Amino acid sequence: MRFRTLALCAASSYNRIMNSRVVAPLLSSACLCALVLNCNPARPTLPAKGVPLADSLYGSTIVRVSDKDVDHYSGNGIQNEYAKADAWSWNGRYLILRGNDGIHYLYDGESYQLIRSLDPLSGGQELEPRWDATDAGQFCYLAGPALMTYSVETQVTDTIHDFRAEFPACAYVSTGVEGDASRDRRYWCFMVSDSLFNLIAVCVFDRNLGSVVGQKTTFPDAVNFSTMDVTGAHAVLCYDSRPMQAFHRDFSHPIDFVAGAAGHSDVALTADSQDVMVYQNVATDYIAMTNLETGVETPLIPIPFDTNPDIGLHVSGNCTSVPGWALISTYGARNAPSGKQHSWMDNLLFMVELKTGPRVVKLAQTHCYTGEQPRPHYFAEAFASINTTGTKVVYGSNWGIQSPDDYTDAYEVRLPAGWNH
């Protein structure tokens, strides 16, 4: 298995990878080591908002996007909604972040200025904003039983579809926050729920036709989330305690994923434009992918739990303009469990190639820790999202600050040109 790194400037447990090799450094070694942290681990010094700095190991440029003292967002922290949706408009002009108290905010994607709160759009469930594929000033969102649009410039909202037309008891539609529409925003896969959030059905909506083109009302397990694939050919359901399933848009042609295909995941495209789901296989301890048409699983890279069992991960397959890659973000404690040591994968953002024997391109350290010692900590999971063009990543980091517990700020990582070559 081949691995590729962006830059290495010092010996580190993060760099112990079989057959690792160094490609041309992006910056001088002095600049690479310019990331200055407070030596007191209890309260690190935070980077200044909007000021680029170089990751001390890999040389990528990191920029702090948010700062409560400047932005005045509510709550203790803010970050991107989740790993699976592109937080930026297609041209990068705008950026949507989610406060850890549940309120979404619109930011200027270039100056990082907070423009406005999006809380007035709330309809009783998560907003799930998804940028339009061609109009950088418009996004879709969910409000009660309806799929809506919002114009950034005019602040005007409009209803695309009210699902009470097909499901009279519908009070809410949702993907479970973890789903996305097809790349062209034509097809959407929603969980339809009543006023008590009981699941009525899962449906596929065709925005061009303005109608539901597929629905399913019986399930082998509780549905955790629903999503379309990138091309819009398949709907995928993730369950609470069994492997995922894929279907054609009308819920025919069911594909059962293999045992263990139930970890954090996202849809992506291979280099030859095949729709796949990339995920942690919890049975084999591999990052793997399944072809949504054939159901064939391809193991990608092993997760080094033998070195450090405290590794969690998220997947982002948004970079559809650079098919054949997915972003992996990992999380864990500052210190490895007793008797163990840190692995190369710990607290890291990296790209994995979607093929057998993949390359791995290490981007940046997250500087985000669930605690000094291993413990569950949702807001410190650094669930990073890559943009559609594969040029930058956004994620939340507590930068080692453990109090308040829900503190994070958003950070951008800029990928160097040619990172995938």
Image (cartoon, helix red, strand yellow):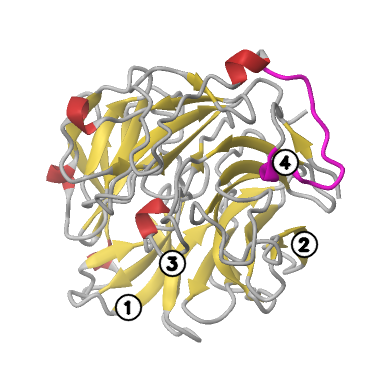
Local crowd at mark 2 within 10 Å, few (<14), some, or many (≥20)? many
Mark 2: amino acid: Pro
Question: Circle 1 sits on which residue?
Answer: 199
Determine contact: label 1, label 3, CB under 8 Å.
Answer: no
Determine contact: label 3, label 4, CB under 8 Å.
Answer: no
Question: Circle 2 sits on which residue?
Answer: 299
Local crowd at mark 1 within 10 Å, few (<14), some, or many (≥20)? some
Query: Mark 2 to mark 3: distance in Å?
Result: 23 Å
Q: Using the image as rendered, state which of residue 254 and residue 383 is in the foreground.
A: 383
Q: What secondary structure is the magenta-colored segment mainly? A: loop
Which residue is farthest left?
A: 120
The disc placed on residue 74 is none
Label 2 or label 1, whichever comes before in sequence order: 1
**Region of the chain picked out in magenta, as a range:** 12-26
Please give left or right for residue 41 compared with residue 99 in the image: right
Residue occupying the point 21% across, 45% down: 76
